[in-house]
Amino acid sequence: MTPEIRALFPISERLIYFNHAAISPPPITSIRAVEAQLKDVHENGSINFRDWLAVKEQGRALLANLLGARPEQVAFMRNTSDALSTVANGLNWRSGDNIVTFRGEFPSNIYPWLRVRDAFGVEVRMCEERGDRIDFAELSSLIDHNTRVVAISHVQFASGFRIDLERLGYVARQHDALFVVDVIQALGVVPTDVEAELIDVAAGAGHKWLMVPEGVGYLYLSDRARERIHPTLVGWVSVPNPDDYRNFEQGWNHGALAWETGTAPTALIHGFKASVELLTRFGVRNIANYLEELTDDLCERLKGKRYELVSSRAPGEKSQIVSIRHVDRLSPMALYHQLKAKNIITAPRNNVLRISPHFYNTPKEVEDFINALP
Ligand SMILES: Cc1ncc(COP(=O)(O)O)c(C=O)c1O
């Protein structure tokens, strides 16, 4: 972490900001990219729109690189919920099918499955939470030959628990189920490889760990997933030649590109490209290592304090999200407000206080946070 990087985040002069699992402040380079595109359209209207499309494709290539995917396997969406919903709605459900997920999932990875349950009579099997962890054996025991989808987050939004994707992906593949992963709490700060981890669908959005202005989501579809999921949200951009306004029989775009429907949030995508470029330049592996050190330090310093560490810190299960509980029952909301009064931003989630630093945060901020804990 260099002073140059920190200077890209002026928020760090005023606040100890530990809430990147909710919304990240975009770096100044990203804000400038958004402003520049808006200024361009303000001054020139549509004249430079080919350049904007090029930026979108550069953003797509950067995103694909983070995932270990090919660019045409990745579509820009509005958000994670849209991405997961369109997957759920695009499968041909048969009676007897089931979906396996986890009860602690963020609702965007629950409601789309409940909707198809109600519409098609399929079964949704939810693995229960055990001591703020997912029990791998229990989760995988729910998967059988009628399982069409295994839907899970790479990193849990409340506990920070990280699941072994490769291991779970293997079980899903053995049962010929699609492995659907909400990667929003991991992509950009946890190395991800859709091929090695046998991921069929990855969904997320940019405003958390990718540090992108809100409003840009994405969907990755493996070739195997693309064969099974029909595009259910389509428009003039979903075809190979969108400029041909008369040929309605072109068929859909290959890969995930069919899921892009119409005009994109062009200014935001300029910000997306700039933010992801920064993370890529720094290196996801380096960021992951840095955040592991920072959060290890945080957990070490918590020892002897009147706080219970909720997040598993076991190798392979820990992540850049650390959640804690006050042992004397100060509520997460009370903790949040007391810390906020000291210019420290965290998040109350369910019955925990969530702490989520990013790569521009420093060990000194961790120390100050620990000293400020009520
Ligand atoms: C695991 C997880 N998935 C999804 C979301 C957000 O979904 P969306 O992009 O639809 O707003 C969040 C947080 O807001 C989250 O923590």
Image (spheres, helix red, strand yellow):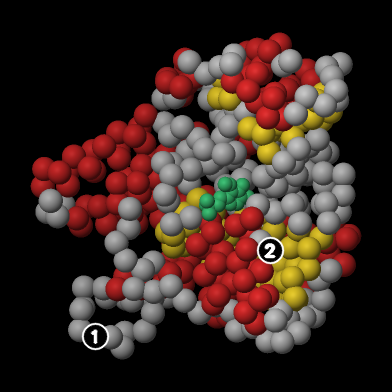
Residue at x 23%, y 38% (from the top left corner): 36
Q: Position of residue 228 (x, y in %)?
A: 58, 80
Q: Nearer the viewer, residue 68 or 19?
A: 19
Residue 4 at x, y percent in the picture: 43, 20
Residue at the location (72% across, 56% down)? 165
Kind of element beneath mark 1:
loop
Residue at the image position 60 percent from the left and 84 percent from the top: 92
Q: Give the left or right position of residue 354, taking residue 243 as reference.
A: right
Q: Give how far apart the Cα atoms at labels 2 and 1 are.
A: 37 Å
What residue do we see at 68% from left, 13% from top? 372
Q: Position of residue 224 (x, y in %)?
A: 59, 76
Q: Looking at the picture, which amino acid does disc 2 mark?
A: Ala
Above or below residue 331? Residue 176 is below
**Label 1, residues with CA under 10 Å away: few <14, some 14-19, many ≥20:** few
- Number of marks present in the image shown: 2
The image quarter containing residue 29 is: top left
Image position of 310 with respect to 76: above or below: above
Which quadrant: the C terminus?
A: top right
Q: Which residue is mark 2?
A: 151
Cβ atoms under marks 2 and 1 closer than 8 Å: no
Residue designated by label 1: 247
Res. 16 in view = yes
In the picture, which quadrant includes the N terminus?
Answer: top right
Judged from the image, the secondary structure of the residue bearing numbered disc 2 is strand
Q: Amino acid at mark 1?
A: Asn
x then y, percent, for residue 317: 78, 43
Question: 170 left or right of 67?
Answer: right
**Nearer-N-terminus badge (2/1):** 2
